[in-house]
Image (cartoon, rainbow, N blue to C red):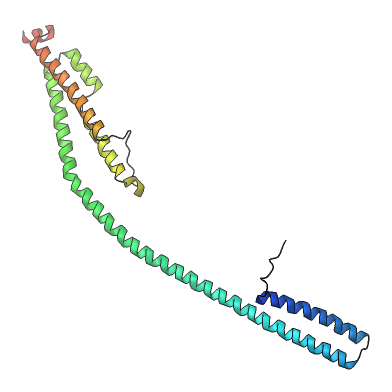
Amino acid sequence: MSTVKPVPHSIEDRLLAARRDRKEVKALLGQAVLQAREEREIKALQEELDLHTAAIERFKAAVEAQAQAVVEQTFEDRKAAVADARATITNRDGEIDKVTAQLLAGINQLAPLAKRLKDAVDERNAALRTGLKAGLDKPSWANVTSSGTVTPLPFVAAALGTALIEAGLPAVGVHIDVASRTDADQLASGIDRVRSQTERLLRKADACLSAPTDDDLDEEL
């Protein structure tokens, strides 16, 4: 495992140098004592050793102070980050409350329009069923009953769902189930097809009334 080398001339680098020098002087002092060299030489080596020892203690203290300063700065930075997060969250929570209230107010305003739309579709479909039942012969009416009422509701619902999707509601977790998206042109085209189919059915009902069937004659008799 490789160790990270200290930056040249940094406190850590000077501490390592002082330790190396102290080790060398300590070895020289040991040799001088073993070889019974002059007291003056031994004393000089001892003084040099003491100087390196003192330097090591100073550098160690400086390194520790530097590390403590980094820790304190890191702690202050972390405290500042938490404070910034709290301020941002408080600000955004206020915006969320405001926008949510505005959206709900806007959606609540749609309720009367949605009811008017439902009532119009229901009345329209009921009128179509009544008219076709009155005019069509039994086989034709049976076909209408089995295939369902021709109604613009699916196209309208797709267009409304598409508008809600394009308004960005799914991005805030609102689930909108739309089989296929519909723009204004597709809505108009779908409505035109429904109206054409409706008109054909009503014409067929008129035609049936213009040419009574055997069943109709039996009922009249």
The residue that appears at 41% across and 67% down in the rendered structure is 84
The residue that appears at 19% across and 45% down in the rendered structure is 111
| Among the 4 quarters of the image, the one containing residue 91 | bottom left
Image quadrant in which the N terminus is located: bottom right
**Is the residue 210 above or below the residue 196 in the image?**
above
Q: Position of residue 102 (x, y in %)?
A: 24, 54
Residues 152 and 149: in front is: 152
Number of numbered discs: 0
Side of 153 relative to 31 (left or right): left
**Is the residue 150 above or below the residue 1 in the image?**
above
The residue that appears at 32% across and 41% down in the rendered structure is 176
Q: Position of residue 86 (x, y in %)?
A: 40, 66
Q: Position of residue 23 (x, y in %)?
A: 80, 79
| Among the 4 quarters of the image, the one containing residue 118 | top left
The residue that appears at 18% across and 17% down in the rendered structure is 141
Q: Residue furthest top?
A: 214
